[in-house]
Image (cartoon, rainbow, N blue to C red):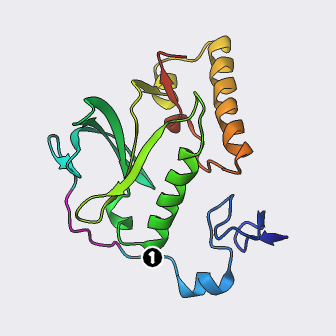
């Protein structure tokens, strides 16, 4: 049985709590019980700086990106001596239970995928201060957004990128996962393509 989203009116499985298209709560009662957060929540920890050790196992090297649902750092896995990417919830969402739940769902969903065009997830954990993070493979490269700012793509290069992106998305869709934020800034081009 399908449930219609109250915000965008798309069809969703009745087992879903959030809309697969716009991420709105599907239950009107639950939406009233959990209104949207409109104030900035305070977080007990300042931003991470170079050299900070997270959870006793990752050393922050640099911030490499930020967006609505996360701040991403390049870090060194101290024990395995390898680079990793750590994605943290942004400070204003650290205390939001719904954001934390979506963050966990994201990690669980992506970790179930095994495809060369999808980032590998190592773990989801939280720091001693309660900051949730996802540890994932670090890939050397640049975003498609940065690449197209420098010069236009050749037709064959654009087609190759589109096909690889579609292959990754198709694998996610096979598992019922919808990305919700496909844009050039979220597509990483590596030297391994």
In x, y percent, where is residue 146? 45, 28
Query: Eyeballing the image, is 39 above or below 135?
Result: below
In x, y percent, where is residue 53? 18, 46
Query: Eyeballing the image, is 172 above or below 148?
Result: below
Within 10 angstroms of label 1, few (less than 14), some, or many (20 or more) residues?
Answer: few
Query: Eyeballing the image, is 67 above or below 17?
Result: above
Q: Name the residue under label 1.
A: 37
Q: Is residue 23 magenta?
A: no
In the image, what residue occupies the spot 29% across and 65% down?
A: 130
- Position of the N terminus by quadrant: bottom right
Q: Which of 127 and 164 is in front in this view?
A: 127
* Among the 4 quarters of the image, the one containing residue 21: bottom right
Q: Does the magenta stretch include residue 44?
A: yes
Is residue 10 visible in the rendered structure shown here? no
Question: Left or right of 150: which side holds 25?
Answer: right
Magenta extent: 40-46
Query: Eyeballing the image, is 114 above or below 29?
Result: above
């Amino acid at each position: 049985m399908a449930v219609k989203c109250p915000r965008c009116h798309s069809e969703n499985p009745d087992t879903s709590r959030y809309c697969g298209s716009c991420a709105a709560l599907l239950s009107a009662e639950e939406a009233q019980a959990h209104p949207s957060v409109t104030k900035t929540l305070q977080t007990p920890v300042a931003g991470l700086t170079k050299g900070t050790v997270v959870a006793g196992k990752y050393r922050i090297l640099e911030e490499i990106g930020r967006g609505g649902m996360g701040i991403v750092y390049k870090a060194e896995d101290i024990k395995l001596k390898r680079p990793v990417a750590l994605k943290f919830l942004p400070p204003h969402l650290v205390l939001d239970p719904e954001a934390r739940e979506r963050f966990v769902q994201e990690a669980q969903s992506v970790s179930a995928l095994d495809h060369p065009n999808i980032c590998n997830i190592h773990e989801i954990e939280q720091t001693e201060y309660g900051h949730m993070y996802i540890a994932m493979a670090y890939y050397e490269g640049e975003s498609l957004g940065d690449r197209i700012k420098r010069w236009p793509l050749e037709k064959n290069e654009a087609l190759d990128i589109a096909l690889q992106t579609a292959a990754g998305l198709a694998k996610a869709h096979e598992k019922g996962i919808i990305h919700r934020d496909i844009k050039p800034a979220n597509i990483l081009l590596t030297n391994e393509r």
